[in-house]
Image: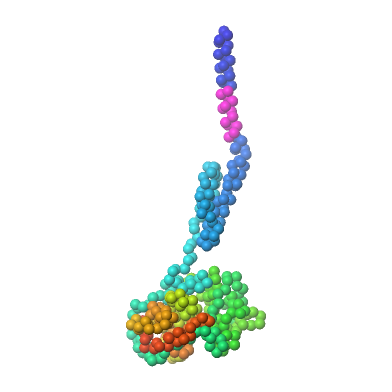
Amino acid sequence: MRNQGWLLFVGLMFVAVTMSMCTNTPIKNEQAKENPQQTTEQTQTEKPSSERASTKEERTPTEQTSTVEPTSEPAAESVAESIPDVAPKESVVEKPPMPDTTPAPNVPVIGGCPIFPADNPWNTDISKQPVDPNSDALIASIGANTSLHPDFGTEWNGAPNGIPFVVVPAGQKGVNVTFQYADESDKGPYPVPKDAPIEGGPNGKGDRHVLVLQKTTCKLFELFSAFPQADGSWKAGSGAIFDLNSNKLRPDKWTSADAAGLPILPGLVKYEEVMAGEIKHALRFTVVRSRRAFVHPATHWASTRTDASLPPMGMRVRLKANVDISGYSKIGQVIMRAMKKYGMFVADNGSNWYVSGAPHEKWDDDKLRDLKKLKGKDFEVVKMGKIYTPANTP
């Protein structure tokens, strides 16, 4: 009996312990259901690491390089691995990288902005394109024996020699511009500083171009016959705004700050690019007599003459491949190689074979005069596409 009583006591104790263990487990689960804050708070405490990582991914590549340490990504992964299964999956999903806006390597860049896409006419290699069948007559009308003239350098008549430009930040305040030819000008505002350089200087009596490139937005603002006003606004003959990330032309028959409806800045010879050893774009030049016609990328004519031997606005010439440039200065050779590869656009009425550039105090004017050894007969007209005239352009 004593043994039986002992066995009964042990059995009852075993049952009691088993019941206690069974009841403890559901009690913990019930507490979790009634008080879910413990799991939520854990997730919220761990989220900031992934949020900071995603904020860095949204920055520009430069900012990422300067702010994200090499150990940042592994740290984010270890945090993600420690998050319980109940944590929202969205907290560890990586955002896609920002698109790469770095300009193509062969595109001219100013102020961090590409000067039009790589396939833009200004940046197109035309050295292998066919010669226009009317090339000889067109060259003769400009002057086969007339010398080329660099219309830029250090100074001329007390003012910077050439067409200047200025680069402004994205936050540059826009100002109102009143236009003489408002029907063919882009409405502002234009981010033109009060002290923006003017072609010919403040007292210049020529074309008085003002060119402004705005960083970040990569917009180009150009004015013709520009005069600053006392209230900070400007008056101008005409004005145009170009998106440097786009190949879009101006409407047909519209002018710009240039007679041809072209932008000016892309066609200027610039000191920095010549010193770097390569010009990666076409140039611009002027002629005395042009035709009442244009070819794209030009969009405007500026003549009453209809003679087919006269150049239409936008006509492109190139230095002939067989012209030996080895005897010229290094500066001259850089410019001439661009004339062979990219050519020059007829952009405005002016003196024959005057090539435009930006002024710079470090230009060597003597070496620039080397270009005068070239004659009109050293050039040929690149085959033109459709020629727009009053007869076929509404």
- The residue segment tinted magenta is 17-29
Q: Give how far across and how far down residue 300 sits, in percent.
A: 47, 83
Query: Mainly helix, strand or loop, the magenta region?
Result: helix
Q: Give how far across and how far down residue 266 sits, in percent.
A: 48, 77
Q: Is residue 56 above or below residue 208?
A: above
Q: Is 296 left, or right, of 205 in this rendering?
A: left
Q: Nearer the viewer, residue 214 or 329?
A: 329
Q: Give how far across and how far down residue 108 sits, in percent.
A: 46, 73
Q: Across the whole image, how many numbered discs are drawn on residues?
A: 0
Q: Is residue 51 above or below residue 320?
A: above
Q: Give how far across and how far down residue 102 sits, in percent.
A: 48, 66
Position of the C terminus, as image quadrant, is bottom left
Residue at position x 61%, y 44% in the image:
41
Q: Nearer the viewer, residue 135 or 150?
A: 150
Q: Is 176 left, or right, of 132 in this rendering?
A: right
Q: Is 139 left, or right, of 226 in this rendering?
A: left
Residue at position x 54%, y 75% in the image:
213
Can you tell which quarter of the image residue 371 is in?
bottom left
Residue at position x 42%, y 80% in the image:
330
Outermost residue, right side: 231
Residue at position x 58%, y 11% in the image:
5
26 drawn magenta: yes
271 drawn magenta: no
Q: Is residue 219 visible?
A: yes
The colour mode here is rainbow
